[in-house]
Image (spheres, rainbow, N blue to C red):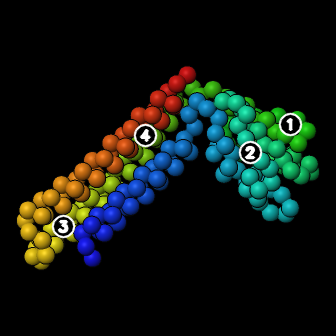
Amino acid sequence: MSFDSRLEQFQKKMDSSMDKFSKDLSGIRAGRASIALLEPIKVEAYGSFVMINQIGAISAPDAKTLSVNVWDKGLVKAVEKAIRDSGANLNPTVDGQIIRVPLPPLSEERRKELSKLASKYTEDAKVAIRNIRRDAMEFVKQLEKNNEISEDEMRKLSASVQEITDNSSKQIDSMLSTKQKDIMQV
């Protein structure tokens, strides 16, 4: 297998780690309403537990409110109860088949906790990137050891791997900075 195709594999692995990091960050509540806050809630309906997005449409009509348009009128009370009991400190109000969920403002303490959580996700992503870098560097050293490439080629390939790693790390830091600004906005 050529090194170029292996380098693409390492790049794809790093991109995959960054995608996971991006999804982790999107799950952290910042100052704006996000439908991701309600998506994990399960509602008791039809004799079993069903994801809330399977019995109603979730939307964010403004920055401080979420709404659920329940399709089956008989499930409105069950959806309201599930949201109230979700542990997210939400107090929904019913308006016909629409449930409005005003989001309480985040306290300074909670903002700091969320910022620390974002930092933890960042460190996890960087560890994953460093592990991919380590594997790539071991592969390059093995090629040189097996005399498949020269020492100069090994240095060039190592520099390419390091450049990809540095770019990924910079993107992660940038994403963290943006998320922390969102979290700390009042």
Label 2: few (<14), some (14–19) or many (≥20) C-alpha neighbours in 10 Å: many
Q: Amino acid at mark 1?
A: Val
Q: Nearer the viewer, mark 1 or mark 3?
A: 3
Label 4 and label 1: CA atoms lie apart by 37 Å
Asked which quadrant contains residue 29, the reply is: top right
Label 1 and label 3: CA atoms lie apart by 62 Å
Residue at mark 3: 140
- Residues under numbered marks 2 and 4 in contact, where contact means CB atoms less than 8 Å apart: no
Label 3 and label 4: CA atoms lie apart by 30 Å
State the mark number for residue 175. 4
Q: Check the image and report above or below for 64 versus 69.
A: above
Q: Nearer the viewer, mark 4 or mark 1?
A: 4
Work out whether mark 3 precedes mark 4 in sequence or the reverse, and give the earlier one: 3
Q: Check the image and report above or below for 98 versus 64.
A: below
Q: Amino acid at mark 3?
A: Val
Which residue shows up at 24% across the image and 51% down it?
163
Q: Nearer the viewer, mark 1 or mark 2?
A: 2
Which residue shows up at 13% across the image and 64% down it?
154
Label 3: few (<14), some (14–19) or many (≥20) C-alpha neighbours in 10 Å: many
Please state, as top left, top right, bottom left or bottom right, where the N terminus lies in the image: bottom left
Q: Secondary structure at mark 1?
A: strand
- Return the x and y of residue 19 as percentages of the image width and height: 46, 53
Residue at mark 1: 94
Label 4: few (<14), some (14–19) or many (≥20) C-alpha neighbours in 10 Å: some
